[in-house]
Amino acid sequence: QVQLVESGGGLVQAGGSLRLSCAASGRTFSSFVMGWFRQAAGKEREFVAAIKWSGGTTYYTDSVKGRFTISRDNAKNTMYLQMNSLKPEDTAVYYCAAREGRIASKLLNEYNYWGQGTQVTVSS
């Protein structure tokens, strides 16, 4: 079993920055692919970014490329999402997720464990 706890959300003006953290516990963190997803009010949950167990390969949805950076510290069992140049359309609840194995995925149903989410609100 893996427990995931997000933190770092909040209210920020457009153009600002936030850094989300996801602390993992329960199993060997380095064996999982980790991902960030988000869900805006009234919309489906969508993929944001993913990072392989080694941290050397990352994936992003097109709308955040060049603005968001995913990273992980396996020694600390923690994953991060640095979000810069935030836009009002980035407003959502952000979830971290873990997927067993070494193959990254953009699909929600391929992730085995989820955090409770953290709210990010970007004002215009």
Image (cartoon, grey):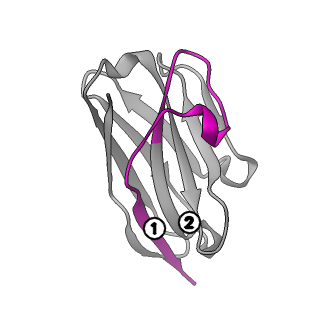
| 42 is within the stretch colored magenta | no
Give coordinates of residue 110: x percent, y percent: 61, 32
Which image quarter: residue 1? top left
Task: Describe residue 8's horizontal placement relative to residue 95 as left or right.
Answer: left
Look at mark 1 in the image and give the residue it sits on.
120
Three-letter amino acid code at disc 1? Val
Task: Describe residue 11's horizontal placement relative to residue 62 as left or right.
Answer: left
Which image quarter: residue 106? top right
Q: Residue at x 55, y 75 (%)?
A: 14
| 117 is within the stretch colored magenta | yes
Which residue occupies the foreground of this view, 42 or 76?
42
Q: Residue farthest to the bottom?
A: 124
Any mark on residue 86, and which?
A: 2
Q: Which residues are magenta?
A: 97-124
Give coordinates of residue 4: x percent, y percent: 33, 41
Three-letter amino acid code at disc 2? Leu
Q: Earlier in the sequence, mark 2 or mark 1?
A: 2
Which residue occupies the foreground of this view, 72 or 93?
93
Which image quarter: residue 29? top left
How crowded pointer 1 is (Cα within 10 Å; few <14, some 14-19, many 20+) is rated as many
- The secondary structure type at the circle numbered 2 is loop
Give coordinates of residue 9: x percent, y percent: 37, 63
